[in-house]
Image (cartoon, rainbow, N blue to C red):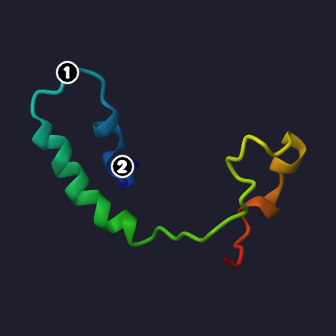
Amino acid sequence: MPAFLVRHVWDEWLRPGKLTDPGDLLDLLDLSSPAVAESVMSHPVSCRVNNARVPDAEKEGPALTAPVEL
Protein backbone atom coordinates (compact mmCIF):
# COMPACT_ATOMS: atom_id res chain seq x y z
CA MET A 1 0.00 0.00 0.00
CA PRO A 2 1.55 3.32 -0.97
CA ALA A 3 1.83 6.13 1.54
CA PHE A 4 0.75 9.43 -0.01
CA LEU A 5 2.86 12.16 1.58
CA VAL A 6 3.40 15.81 0.78
CA ARG A 7 7.04 16.74 0.23
CA HIS A 8 7.59 18.64 3.49
CA VAL A 9 6.95 15.51 5.62
CA TRP A 10 9.20 13.09 3.67
CA ASP A 11 12.19 13.53 5.98
CA GLU A 12 10.13 12.94 9.10
CA TRP A 13 8.48 9.85 7.55
CA LEU A 14 11.84 8.39 6.51
CA ARG A 15 13.72 9.38 9.67
CA PRO A 16 15.69 6.39 10.97
CA GLY A 17 15.35 5.37 14.56
CA LYS A 18 12.93 3.69 16.88
CA LEU A 19 9.28 4.64 16.54
CA THR A 20 8.10 5.81 19.94
CA ASP A 21 4.58 6.90 19.05
CA PRO A 22 2.88 5.32 16.01
CA GLY A 23 0.27 8.06 16.26
CA ASP A 24 2.84 10.56 15.01
CA LEU A 25 3.14 8.73 11.69
CA LEU A 26 -0.62 8.34 11.44
CA ASP A 27 -0.92 12.10 11.91
CA LEU A 28 1.46 12.60 8.96
CA LEU A 29 -0.73 10.36 6.82
CA ASP A 30 -3.88 12.17 7.92
CA LEU A 31 -2.26 15.48 6.98
CA SER A 32 -0.85 14.37 3.64
CA SER A 33 -2.96 11.63 2.10
CA PRO A 34 -6.08 13.61 1.16
CA ALA A 35 -4.04 16.39 -0.45
CA VAL A 36 -1.92 14.02 -2.53
CA ALA A 37 -4.75 11.60 -3.36
CA GLU A 38 -6.73 14.42 -4.98
CA SER A 39 -3.97 14.82 -7.55
CA VAL A 40 -3.47 11.11 -8.37
CA MET A 41 -4.83 10.00 -11.71
CA SER A 42 -5.12 6.47 -13.07
CA HIS A 43 -6.05 4.74 -16.28
CA PRO A 44 -5.92 1.18 -17.64
CA VAL A 45 -2.67 0.25 -19.41
CA SER A 46 -1.49 -2.57 -21.66
CA CYS A 47 -1.86 -6.11 -20.32
CA ARG A 48 1.84 -6.50 -21.20
CA VAL A 49 2.74 -4.45 -18.11
CA ASN A 50 3.96 -6.78 -15.32
CA ASN A 51 3.37 -9.86 -17.47
CA ALA A 52 6.26 -12.32 -17.11
CA ARG A 53 5.25 -14.15 -20.31
CA VAL A 54 5.85 -11.11 -22.51
CA PRO A 55 9.36 -10.94 -24.06
CA ASP A 56 11.56 -8.18 -22.63
CA ALA A 57 11.72 -6.37 -25.97
CA GLU A 58 7.94 -5.87 -25.84
CA LYS A 59 8.03 -4.44 -22.30
CA GLU A 60 9.72 -1.19 -23.27
CA GLY A 61 8.51 2.13 -24.55
CA PRO A 62 5.84 4.67 -23.74
CA ALA A 63 3.10 2.68 -25.49
CA LEU A 64 2.91 0.32 -22.50
CA THR A 65 1.60 3.03 -20.21
CA ALA A 66 -0.62 4.78 -22.73
CA PRO A 67 -4.34 4.57 -21.87
CA VAL A 68 -6.16 1.61 -23.42
CA GLU A 69 -9.84 0.89 -24.03
CA LEU A 70 -11.34 -1.88 -21.93
Farthest-out residue, bottom: 69
| Dots 1, 2 in contact, CB < 8 A | no
Q: Position of residue 23 (x, y in %)?
A: 11, 42
Q: Is residue 22 left or right of residue 9?
A: left
Q: Point out residue 40 in the picture as x, y percentages from the top left corner.
A: 47, 67
Q: Residues within 10 Å of mark 2 (few under 14, many from 20)?
A: few
Q: Amino acid at mark 1?
A: Lys
Q: Which residue is mark 2?
A: 3
33 is higher (above) or lower (below) than 12: below
Q: Secondary structure at mark 1?
A: loop
Residue drawn at (81%, 48%) of the image: 59
Q: Residue furthest right?
A: 57
The residue that mark 1 highlights is 18
The quarter of the rendered structure image containing the C terminus is: bottom right
Q: Secondary structure at mark 2?
A: loop
Q: Is residue 69 above or below residue 3?
A: below
Tell me the quarter of the picture where residue 64 sits: bottom right
**Is 9 or 33 nearer to us in this picture?**
33
Q: Nearer the viewer, residue 20 or 11?
A: 20
Disc 1 crowd, CA 10 A, few/some/many (<14, 14-19, 20+): few
User: For the point 36% across and 43% down, which residue is it?
Assistant: 10
Residue 4 location, quadrant: bottom left
- Residue 68, image quadrant: bottom right
Image disc number at residue 35: none
User: Is 67 located above or below residue 15 in the figure?
Assistant: below
- Please tell me whether mark 1 or mark 2 is closer to you in this view: 2
Type of amino acid at the residue the image marks with label 2: Ala
